[in-house]
Amino acid sequence: MDPGRTPVTGSAAAVDEAAWASAVAAVRGVPLDAEVQLICHVNPDGDALGSMLGFALGLRRLGFTRLRATFPGEFDVPEPYRALPGSDLLVPEQEAYRSAPLILIFDVAAESRLGALASLLGGVSRVVVLDHHASNTDFGDVNLVDPGAAATSVVADELLTRLGVPLDAEIAECLYVALTTDTGSFKFVRTPAVHTLAARLIATGISAADIARRTFDTRPFGAMKLTGEVLGRAVLDRSAAGGHGLAWTYATTADLERHNQRPYVLDALIDPIRGVAEADVAVVIKELTPGEWAVSLRSKGAVDVSAVAVALGGGGHRLAAGFTAHGEPEDVIMRIRPLLDAHLA
Ligand code: AMP
Ligand code: MN
Ligand code: MN
């Protein structure tokens, strides 16, 4: 390729042509009235839901009539994503098609992120995985995994294009929510391709400003108060990570109950913690169900937090990763601390 040019999407490079062809064949290979099950990861975020629903709408445009989309765990769609186009296709995990000939999986690095839905795999279904985690375990029959893609929606967009689905405003809204979620509203962008895709999505007529306000800048008063409390108990550990520093905090189910908030409101906490100048590493420990914590890890570059998360049973990207933990927040930090030193970049 001309070195002065960049690919239109981030996915072309990392996923080989044979895998794209297999994915297209898998979709084209089932009749339009076949059951098609779409699945994204537990505690779904904007990329998981947006790439899944955007792709589901694309399949609907192709004429597929029996589409269901789901995710493992309690059927509690985070408020900012409830009005996403295609939400009518969402069903609780108990209502997933049990023997669909085609299963499409979005933003899932490993089967452990599928909870009870992992049992749907391994049957007669063809399983196509669309993802962008370097730690992806290639658990599908076809694995469209591009660690260089800013979001799973980049991969979804490429497959929709290859299937000949014309982009429309509803699909674009889903993919745009996904893209802005995983790029921190374009703060983590490393290639012009992300903005090229954003421009194509916005050209369908969607309002980027409205979507950003609804998705990132709207929260209940109680969530704002909860955020204040949780940030107020943050700890700065300057000697952690080989002296690069660690800032961390935690939130409990009791905190959520006191403020009458749902767990998704805790996802935004990592951003102010990540902004602490004296720390390279940011950690937020979130109690989603009693005794079980979802841990978010971020680094500015000194530590490979994906390696840290993998060592603790999770996964993610070099600068953004997570895992599930049990015990008290202090115990979780004691487990993380030596691994930060072991995985200095
Ligand atoms: P989060 O902190 O939840 O925004 O997640 C940051 C990154 O880590 C995302 O790419 C997630 O997919 C990944 N991740 C978070 N939790 C887990 C987990 N328990 N297992 C594997 N990957 C995870
Ligand atoms: Mn995700
Ligand atoms: Mn993602």
Image (spheres, rainbow, N blue to C red):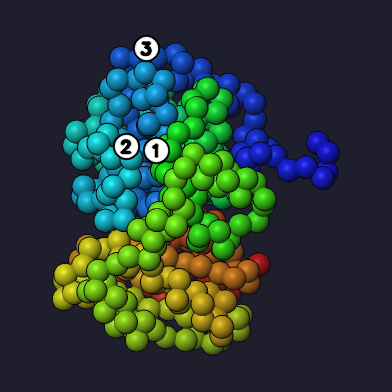
Q: Looking at the rendering, which quadrant does residue 269 occupy?
A: bottom left
Q: The residue under label 3 is which amino acid type?
A: Pro
Mark 1 and 2 residues: CB-CB less than 8 Å, in contact? yes
User: Which SS class for mark 1?
Assistant: helix
On the question of residue 123 being in view, the answer is: no
At 45% across and 77% down in the image, what residue appears? Answer: 273
In the drawing, what numbered circle is on residue 86?
2
Q: Is residue 160 above or below residue 208?
A: above
If you read the primary sequence from the N terminus, does the residue marked by circle 1 or circle 2 appear first? Answer: 2
Q: The residue under label 1 is which amino acid type?
A: Glu
At 59% across and 71% down in the image, what residue appears? Answer: 300
Task: From the viewer's side, name the closer residue of 124 and 264.
Answer: 264
Q: Is residue 271 above or below residue 177?
A: below
User: Which SS class for mark 3?
Assistant: loop
Quadrant of the snapshot with the N terminus: top right
If you read the primary sequence from the N terminus, does the residue marked by circle 3 or circle 2 appear first? Answer: 3
- What residue is pinned by disc 1? 170
Mark 3 and 2 residues: CB-CB less than 8 Å, in contact? no
- What residue is pinned by disc 3? 31
Residue 187 is left or right of residue 286, and the answer is: right
Q: Looking at the rendering, which quadrant does residue 170 occupy?
A: top left
Q: The residue under label 2 is which amino acid type?
A: Gly
Number of numbered discs visible in the structure rendering? 3
On the question of residue 209 being in view, the answer is: yes
Q: Looking at the rendering, which quadrant does residue 123 occupy?
A: top left
